[in-house]
């Protein structure tokens, strides 16, 4: 009996110690309150929302809600086309700097792109993690980063669009901060998550601007998405797109992760000046057979409309072919994008290989676009063909 009481006592002591640790560690890990500030047309005092209509909270298609979706994804019982376990990537080693008006863009994978221009090295949503999720879980990378971390040039500016794990990778941000001390620009509340790594970020609301060096300004612009790191923190931090205003040659636009929403936000970004290069997501759009988009993600059809409404000289499709996040086949996004671009009359917006530097021509004025942009319904009618319907 004495031995039993001793064991029980030790167990209770361990439980008390564990509870004490949990009280100290867990709140910091969850960090449910990322931002406190005045109410606005997209913040209710506790959580952010999309002012153009909230359609990002619906469970993915296929029935059973989000829990059912994740269970089917985990067990492989969701009928999705088979993806390759790995895809070949020819890694490159970028130049230390690209001076003057010249611009070179290298897609590193998913939403991570290195843009070099005017002596400035810009990195978007840097993710070098093997898996896109918490605690080592989540979809596994099928494509090696197009530029090895040690071959990244010194980074001057990092743009972080929101706090999902496939866009805000704390380990990568910590490595960048320790090595380069870049300026990190994000939207409201994400600086709290980034700050857990020891890095410091500038967090701005939509419409906010910050000068990062003479002649170079970052504007935080509206898009249509949501945010969460855990179960209890949905929409505690804001999501955004960005315009990097450059001295000459046209601006850089990074859409972040976004749904179509009201479709007006691209014009708001274009109003800040001619867009030389637009980084636009085209993947993770299909959560049920035949689906062309979700509330939170544009697919290729809507990406082509965004490109048209931006009046961008060049588009680079991102957010596909790295992490398997949805149902579409591995190469469906670029194939469907090519069909969508034929519907809009064409342009310079097509898939590029991971890791291969792309020379981006200057844009001195917005590319002319129709007075009345193509509607989503018109796009879907145009894409209603046997060839497109056969794409999985």
Image: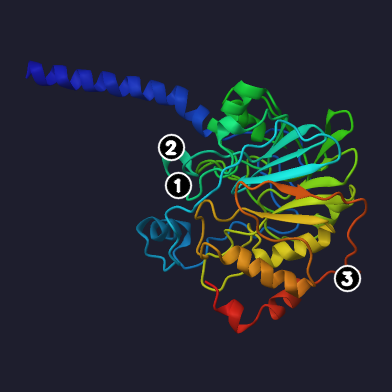
Q: CA distance from mark 2 to mark 1?
A: 9 Å
Q: Residue at coordinates 73% horizontally, 74% vertically from top-left? A: 379
Horizontal and vertical percent for residue 286?
Answer: 55, 65
- SS under mark 3: loop
Q: Which of the two labelled residues, at mark 2 and mark 3, occupies the earlier sequence position?
A: 2
Q: Is residue 293 above or below residue 274?
A: below
Circle 2 SS class: helix
Coordinates of residue 154 in the picture (x, y in percent): 68, 27
Who's the residue at 64% across and 63% down the image? 299
- Seen in the image, is 34 located left or right of residue 101? left
**Secondary structure beneath label 1:** loop
On screen, residue 313 above or below 392 = above
Task: Indicate which disc residue 372 carries.
Answer: 3
| Separation of marks 1 and 3 at Cα, in angstroms | 41 Å
Query: Residue 135 got which mark?
Result: 2
Residue 138: which numbered mark, if any? 1
């Amino acid at each position: 009996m004495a031995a039993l009481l001793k064991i029980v006592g030790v167990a209770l002591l361990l439980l008390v110690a564990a509870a004490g640790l949990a009280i100290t560690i867990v709140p910091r890990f969850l960090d449910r309150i990322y931002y406190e500030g005045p109410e606005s047309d997209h913040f209710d005092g506790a959580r952010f929302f999309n002012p153009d209509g909230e359609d990002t909270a619906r469970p993915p298609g296929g029935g059973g809600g989000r829990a059912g979706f994740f269970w089917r994804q985990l067990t492989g019982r969701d009928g999705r086309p088979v993806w390759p376990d790995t895809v070949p990537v020819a890694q490159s080693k970028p130049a230390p700097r690209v001076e003057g008006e010249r611009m070179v863009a290298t897609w590193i994978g998913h939403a991570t792109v290195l843009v070099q221009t005017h002596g400035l090295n810009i990195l978007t949503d840097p993710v070098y993690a093997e898996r896109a999720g918490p605690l080592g879980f989540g979809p596994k990378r099928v494509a090696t980063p197009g530029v090895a971390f040690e071959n990244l040039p010194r980074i001057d500016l990092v743009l972080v669009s929101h706090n999902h794990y496939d866009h805000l990778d704390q380990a990568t941000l910590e490595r960048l901060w320790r090595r380069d001390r870049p300026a990190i620009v994000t939207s409201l509340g994400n600086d709290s998550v980034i700050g857990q790594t020891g890095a410091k970020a500038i967090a701005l609301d939509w419409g906010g601007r910050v000068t990062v060096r003479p002649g170079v300004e970052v504007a935080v612009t509206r898009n249509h998405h949501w945010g969460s790191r855990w179960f209890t923190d949905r929409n505690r931090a804001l999501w955004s797109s960005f315009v990097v205003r450059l001295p000459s040659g046209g601006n850089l636009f990074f859409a972040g992760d976004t749904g179509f929403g009201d479709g007006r936000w691209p014009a708001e970004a274009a109003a800040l000046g001619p867009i030389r290069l637009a980084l636009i997501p085209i993947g993770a759009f299909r959560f049920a057979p035949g689906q062309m988009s979700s509330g939170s993600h544009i697919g290729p059809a809507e990406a082509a409309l965004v490109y048209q409404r931006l009046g961008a000289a060049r588009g680079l499709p991102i957010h596909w072919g790295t992490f398997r996040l949805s149902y579409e086949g591995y190469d469906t996004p670029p194939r469907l994008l090519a069909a969508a671009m034929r519907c809009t009359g064409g342009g310079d917006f097509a898939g590029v290989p991971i890791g291969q530097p792309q020379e981006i021509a200057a844009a001195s004025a917005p590319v002319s676009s129709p007075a009345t942009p193509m509607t989503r319904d018109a796009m879907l009618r145009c894409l209603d063909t046997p060839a497109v319907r056969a794409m999985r």
